[in-house]
Image (cartoon, grey):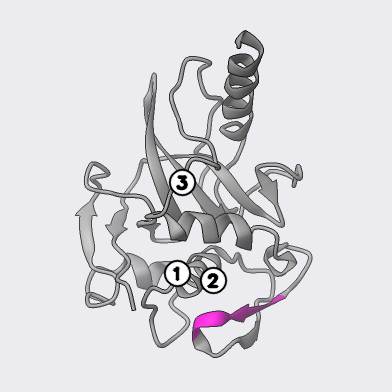
Amino acid sequence: MKINFLLIAISVIFYLSGCSSSSETEERTESADEGSEAKTKTEYGESSVILNTAMSEQGNEMYSPDIDSTYLYWLDNDLIILDGSTKCNIFALNVLYRSGFKTPDENALARDLFDTANYKEILPVIGINEITKAGKGDLVVWYSHVIIFESVLEINDGEYAIAWWAGTRQQDNEDNIRNNVCYGKYRLDGEYVVRRPVKK
């Protein structure tokens, strides 16, 4: 029994360590305290299809920085060449589309999703710089980055989102970071909006 608890605790700590934002934004992660409470990837449940889809989509090599083209599932699998830009918006919208949620009828960049005047019908804004209303699968959007929210983690100096996102400065580790898609904690600072996906 003690061994199982120890293995679970070590797994949670490992999953929450060391991810960071895309190169367009500042470093936002820190090590989690050993006593932190957070859910692991396997504890999703029926209502979290977006999170399960994000986990599945992490295995797709097209999000790797080594591949300069990617497909926009929500735009009839349109192939685009990125010329080195990050794929956080593409990952988030591909996950929503595959999960059965509404998506824009264009390639919406992070800055487009950040603008609260855009996409009100399909991704309503439920909070501005306020994470307390966020639920599993919501998007947290900064001007230059997008993450898929799971839960909040409080660490000494602030709040972090346990989340999924594409675009990290960390190397793939074949565990919580694969194909430049990260599952980990992301610091909730700066100006951000929270958007709630709407089912198709």
Q: Which residue is mark 1?
A: 96
Q: How many marks?
A: 3
Q: N-terminal of the two: label 3 or label 1? A: 3
Name the outermost residue toward the right.
66
10 Å crowding of disc 2: few (<14), some (14-19), many (20+): many
Q: Secondary structure at mark 1?
A: helix
What's the residue at 32%, 66% (across, down)?
197
Q: Which is more foreground, mark 3 or mark 2? A: 3
Residue 146 appears in the figure = no
Residue type highlighted by circle 1: Leu
Q: Secondary structure at mark 2?
A: helix
Q: Quadrant of residue 173?
A: top right
In the image, the segment drawn in magenta is 69-74
**Relative side of 118 to 109, left or right:** left
Q: Position of residue 51 (x, y in %)?
A: 48, 54
What's the residue at 46%, 69% (across, down)?
99
Q: Nearer the viewer, residue 16 or 68?
A: 16
Q: Quadrant of residue 84?
A: bottom right
Magenta-drawn stretch, dominant element (helix, strand or loop): strand
